Amino acid sequence: MQYSTLGSSGLKVSRVCLGTMTFGKQNTQAEASEQLDYALDHDINFIDTAEMYAVPPTKETYGKTEEYIGNWLAENPGKREKVIIATKIAGRGLSYIRGGDKILGKYIESSIDESLRRLQTDYIDLYQLHWSNRPSPHFNRHWFGKVDFSTIDVAQENEEILEVLQALDKCVKAGKIRFCGLSNESSWGIEKYIQLSKDHNLPRMVSVQNEFSLIQTKDWPYVTESCVLNDMAYLPWSPLGGGVLSGKYLNGAMPEGSRWSFAGRHGNFRNQEAVHKAVAAYAEIAKKYGMTTSQLSLAWCNQFEWVTSTIIGATKMSQLKEDLAGFEQPLSEEAMADIDKVLRQYPIPYA
C-alpha cells in the first residue's frame, strides 16, 4: 500500500480510503466489521463516514454507519490508533437532521459530540463539512443554468463560514477533532475558507472530498489547482460513478440489491444513454489490458499525483478485493491514450 500526506495535516493516509456509506443499509454489522478488518489487514488506514449515512439517507438509518464503525472499534480497542477516521456534518435539506437547517457554528460542537458517541471514540481525525450552505455545482448541478450564483449573499456566506471556523477551532482546542476538511466544495469555497482561517488564525482546511471519476471530471483543472496551491488533499468520492463504471448496469441490467435498485436522494441522474456508451467503451479498454472495468477506473483515479486517497465502497467482499487490485495495476501510456480518446468523446456524459 502506498501512502500520501493529507494536505497540510502531516497525517499519512493510505491511497485507498474505505468508504462506508453502505453500512447500516446494504451491509449488516457483521459485514461491515469484515470489511473494516480486511481493509486494515491490507494496510488501509483511512476510513470515511458521515453522520448522514447510511445511504440512501433516511431518518431510520441516520447515524447507523457511524454506530457500526463504533461497534467495531469497541470490539477491537487496539485498532483505534491504527486508523484515521473521517466523518462529516450534514448540510441543509434533511428535515430530521437539525430541522433541515444549514451548517452553522451553533451546531458544530453538539454534532461532533454525537458523532463521537456513535463512533465510541474520544477524537475524530478529520471532520468535514458535507456540502456548502450556498447553491453549488455538485450533485448533478454542473450543467449550464442549474445554479444561479448571482443569488448568493457573499456577506452572509462570509459570516457563516467564519462562525463555523470559530466553532471548529473550539473543538480542535478541546481535542475532539484533529483536523478539518471540506466536501462537495468549489474553488471559490476552498479559497474563502483558506483566506478566513488565515485572517483570523483559525483551523485551516486540510482536504476537500468531491465527486471525481471517468464520467465526472468537472474538478479538473480549477478545483485541483486550488488544492495543489493551498496544500490541500484531494479525495475523490464515487470513483466508480455510483457503481456504473463497474459495468454491472450495461444493457439495462439492474442487479438485485445494487445501489441503483434503491431510490437515491437526488434521483438516478447517472442512468443516461451517454454514460452507458462511455462505460461500454471503457469496458473494452479494460478487457484489452486484462483488467475489470472497476479496476481500470480506479487505476485511472489513482495515477494523478494530486489525488491523495481515492474513496472506494463495496457491498460484497468480492467487490472490495477486486477494487483493491485496481490500485496494484498502474496504467501504461498506451492504456492512458486509449482512455483519453473515450474521455474526449464523452467528457460530460450526464448533466
Image (cartoon, rainbow, N blue to C red):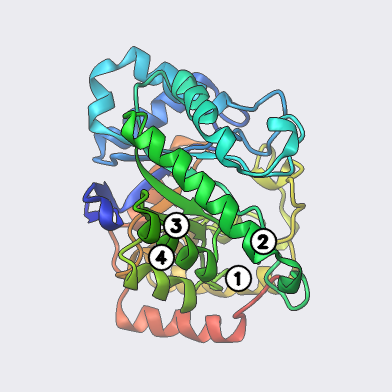
User: At 44% across and 83% down in the image, what residue appears?
Assistant: 338
In space, the residues marked 4 and 1 are separated at their CA atoms by: 18 Å
- Which residue in the structure is indicated by mark 3? 208
Q: Residue at x 41, y 18 (%)?
A: 120
The image quarter in which residue 141 lies? bottom right
Q: Which mark is drawn over residue 301?
A: 4
Horizontal placement of 342 versus 81: left or right? right
Residue identifier under label 2: 250
From where the camera sits, is residue 187 visible? yes
Residue 171: % across, % down: 40, 33
Q: CA distance from mark 3 to mark 2?
A: 31 Å
Q: Is residue 262 above or below residue 326?
A: above
Q: Quadrant of residue 303?
A: bottom left
Using the image, determine if residue 50 lies above or below residue 10. Answer: above
Q: Specify the amino acid type for callout 1.
A: Ala
Which of the two labelled residues, at mark 4 and mark 1, occupies the earlier sequence position?
1
Does residue 138 appear to the left or right of 315 in the view shown? right
**Disc 2 marks which amino acid?**
Leu
